Structure formats: structure tokens, C-alpha cells
Amino acid sequence: MNFKEKFKVMLNIHTRVVTGIFFVLCFYLFWIPGYSSIRIIDILGVQLIGLISAVTYLPFLVEKEYSKSVLAVLNTAYFLVINSVVLITGYKLEWFSFQFKKSVIAMETMIIAVYAITKVIFYLIDYTDAAKLNKKIQERNRNN
């Protein structure tokens, strides 16, 4: 995979992560009374999370195929990095407080939700792309 392709994947990841976070944030702002604004620093924090999510995805782009065990290790490490970055960023930007267990649980739930949604979206996109490729190959083989 060349630099241009890697950059495109990283930009996709950044976009999806940031979009997912903003959807969760909008839901949070709508349902939680008393907190009704988004600061510029919050937007920058979300952008930072998106950037780190994209950059830390690079190990997935080194090889075309990984064994299941390597993929499991990479996915676990990726989740732990993203989780840590979001928790640190969220704490520093006062999105939650470690003093209140409910806020930590809510934050962790949101992190897991955004991560899971992003993973599902990527899986569906990859599945659709693979199905299109297989269909083209089958059509080409029928025509030959």
C-alpha cells in the first residue's frame, strides 16, 4: 500500500471517528440537562482523538493479511490506545471526572459505542467492497 492509499484510509478513519464522537456528543447534549454547549477546545480535542485514531491505525496497513492472533493483538492494542487517549483528553477537557463513577462509566460506554460503531462500519464497507470485487471476477470469468 503506497502513501496515498494509506493517507486515504487514515483520513477515512479520522472522519468516521470524529463523526461518531460528534453523534454521541449531540446525543449526550440533548439528553443530559445542564450541559448544552460545545467549546472550541472540545472540537479540537475531538479532532485530536480522530488524528490519533488514524495514526495509530497504521500498523494495520503494513501487511495485507494478518493471522487471527496478530489481528487480535493489534485490535486490542488499538482499542487500549484509543481508550486511553479519549480518557486522558476527556479528563483534561473536563468532559467527566474520575471522582464520579457514573461519569466515568458513561464516558467508557460512549468510547466503546463509538469504537464498536466504527468497527462495524469498516467491516460493512470491507464486506461490500469484497462482494463487488468477487462479482466482477465472476462476471469476467463467465465472459471468458
Image (cartoon, helix red, strand yellow):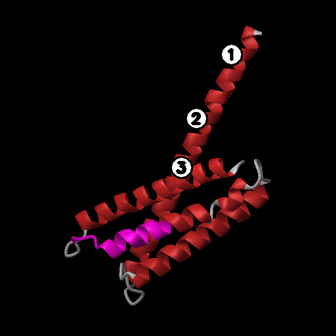
Magenta-span inclusion, residue 138: no
Q: Nearer the viewer, mark 3 or mark 2?
A: 2
Residue 142 to residue 136: above or below: above
Q: Position of residue 91 (x, y in %)?
A: 42, 83
Q: CA distance from mark 3 to mark 2?
A: 12 Å
Residue at image coords 55%, 69%: 82
The disc label shown at residue 128, or none: 2
Question: On the rendered structure, is 91 left or right of 133?
Answer: left
Q: Amino acid at mark 3?
A: Val
Please name the residue that numbered disc 1 is placed on.
Answer: 139
**Badge 3 density bin: few <14, some 14–19, many ≥20, Cα 10 Å:** few
Q: Position of residue 137 (x, y in %)?
A: 71, 22
Residue 98 to residue 37: above or below: below
Q: Report the span colored magenta.
A: 36-49
Question: On the rendered structure, is 104 left or right of 35?
Answer: right
**Badge 1 density bin: few <14, some 14–19, many ≥20, Cα 10 Å:** few
The disc label shown at residue 10, or none: none
